[in-house]
Image: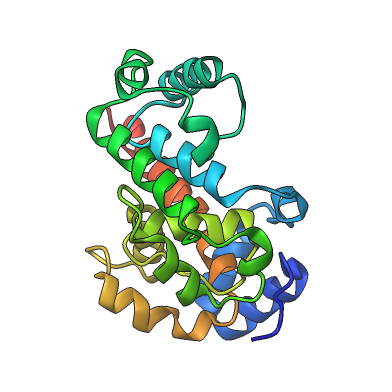
Amino acid sequence: MSRQARGFDTAEAFAHLCRRDRKLGAWMRRLDPIGANPQWRKPFDPVDALARAILYQQLSGKAAATIVGRVETAIGSDRFHCDTLARIDDAALRGCGVSGNKLLALRDLARREEAGEIPTLRRMAAMSDDDIVAALVPVRGIGRWTVEMMLMFRLGRPDVLPIDDLGIRKGAQAVDKLEAMPTPKELTARGERWGPYRSYASFYLWRIADAAAGAKQAVARSQD
């Protein structure tokens, strides 16, 4: 497989989606334009990113940031890797506020990195989306959604549709004026027309879900 560039032409994606899907396009024109994500051009370390994703799971941003800061102080580094995580024992990690499940996930990530199982950023450039997912979901605590967020927001892959994401499903529900959210299977079929820019469609679906929820709240307040 040839190397894939990070990011894509958002103007081209906008025009393509408006042309292929009139319902989605009408919403997109009503919302502010979504430009290229600056993170697409910034280097990052996949192992460090995955470790932080693990630590942030199921916590508020503030609480997670506090725990991350404690761990960074304890290991004397702002990079999470097998060698830096080896500087701290399990009891000390728990003392930083890391839960038992997350501790096991970090240890598993470190073990897999040491074994060469976690692809580097350079290797990822030559891998398909599905191959990256397959390489990373075996890590304890890392699910498909977490990898999809890396693909979309860090690697800038243009054609990712997180079908299990509630925000995406609610956005699709609003676009099609459905009584219930589409199932993941239905969303997969619905998203076929958005290729090869399903990531860009997803960015808008999140915003559409927020806008639709705000409109419902405004109507509810007006009726009080």
Q: Nearer the viewer, residue 95 or 148?
A: 95
**In what quadrant of the picture does the C terminus appear?**
top left
User: Residue 74, position in %: x, y?
Assistant: 50, 16
Q: How many marks?
A: 0
Whether 151 is drawn above or below 196: the answer is above
Q: Nearer the viewer, residue 64 or 22?
A: 64
Name the colour scheme: rainbow
**In what quadrant of the picture does the N terminus appear?**
bottom right
Whether 92 is drawn above or below 33: the answer is above
Residue 18 left/right relative to 82: right
Q: Nearer the viewer, residue 43 or 119?
A: 119
Residue 7 left/right relative to 151: right
User: Residue 29, position in %: x, y?
Assistant: 65, 63
Q: Residue at x 65, y 62 (%)?
A: 156
Whether 151 is drawn above or below 68: the answer is below
User: Residue 61, position in %: x, y?
Assistant: 46, 26
Whether 86 is drawn above or below 141: the answer is above
Q: Residue at x 48, y 37 (%)?
A: 52
Q: Residue at x 55, y 78 (%)?
A: 128
User: Residue 30, position in %: x, y?
Assistant: 62, 58
Task: Say which quarter of the image contains residue 9.
Answer: bottom right
Task: Say which quarter of the image contains residue 174.
Answer: bottom left
Q: Residue at x 73, y 69 (%)?
A: 8
Task: Say which quarter of the image contains residue 172.
Answer: bottom left
